[in-house]
Amino acid sequence: MNEHESVVDLRLDRAHSSRIYDYFLGGKTNFLADRMAAGSVLGVFPAALVAARINREFMHRTTRVLAASGMRQFLDIGTGIPTAPNLHDVAQGIAPDARVVYTDNDPIVLAHAAALLRSTPEGRTAYVQADVHDPAGILTAPQLLDTLDLGRPVALSLNALMHFVPDDGGDRAHEIVECLKAALPSGSTLAMSHATPDFSPEAMGKIIKIYGEAGTRLQFRSRAAFLRFFDGWELLEPGVTLSHQWRPDHPEDATHVTDAEAACYAGVARKP
């Protein structure tokens, strides 16, 4: 190793939110600390596996809907560890020329980014190692600007991300989302999901403590607080719902999960 190379500490001895989520989705990129934290979450919220699965399915459905409606540019912030089908698999399955930029701040995701870069010949994918706390850094990243045209509509995806941005007495999470929204032109969309304490406040409080002990801060939000993320944009039908209720592929799918099990609001909106 020369003096210009650096070592990235993956901190595998501490649980990480993206690897815990990977475990909930049945993935293989998780370690003992992640599995122990996941086990603690399941101890207070046994539906965590269900909640993770239906949140992932919400991403699949919204991507299909938006690609079918003509969206050809996608920006997925807080990508997480690749889990097939990934967003570009879904989008390019409908529109082979779709362009997708992924971003995440976990070095483990970077290590697996090759799985996110297997684009169709007609389309393109790129990966940006970045943090949502620095939205301007994401929007000006060379990989993003080489892949997406910010003068044309972009489908912004913030799935299960903003509850990892506590407000700390201010309104930080909403300010970040407003910064991202302001950079996108008319016709752009925002697809978003966010965990809520509205149905199981005691369990959600315990989850916040478990993640906090692992060094990850959480702030779950009410429906009213979630709705504010879409201010100024036009919600697509059926508006804000629980994640499993947003345009389910089969109506009966929405009856197999309770609101308390989903514990996650979801919605899609378009910039006028």
Image (cartoon, rainbow, N blue to C red):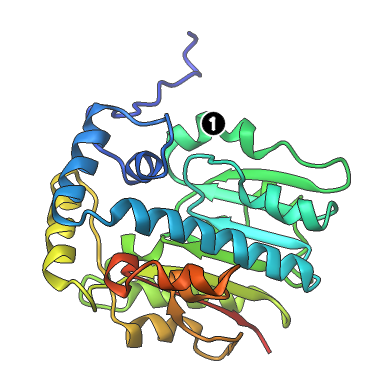
Of the pair 41 and 124, the residue shown nearer to us: 41
Rendering quarter of residue 263: bottom left
Disc 1 target residue = 112
Q: Is residue 129 visible?
A: yes
Point out residue 100 in the picture as x, y percentages from the top left corner.
Answer: 70, 53
Q: Residue furthest right?
A: 122
Of the pair 214 and 83, the residue shown nearer to us: 83
Q: Local crowd at mark 1 within 10 Å, few (<14), some, or many (≥20)?
A: some
Q: Is residue 154 visible?
A: no
Rendering quarter of residue 116: top right
Q: Residue at x 19, y 50 (%)?
A: 41
Image quadrant holding the C terminus, namely bottom right
Q: Residue furthest front?
A: 252
As drawn, 270 above or below 138: below
Q: Residue at x 35, y 67 (%)?
A: 262
Instruction: Say which element carries label 1.
Output: loop
Q: Residue at x 56, y 64 (%)?
A: 157
Q: Residue at x 25, y 34 (%)?
A: 35
Point out residue 108 in the picture as x, y percentages from the top left corner.
Answer: 44, 33
Point out residue 265 in the picture as x, y percentages from the top left corner.
Answer: 40, 74
Q: Would residue 238 appear left or right of 211 to someone viewing this image?
A: right
Q: Would residue 15 appear left or right of 243 to someone viewing this image?
A: left
Q: Amino acid at mark 1?
A: His
* Figure disc tally: 1
Rendering quarter of residue 228: bottom left
As drawn, 131 above or below 258: above
Q: Residue furthest top?
A: 1
Point out residue 139 in the picture as x, y percentages from the top left corner.
Answer: 61, 60
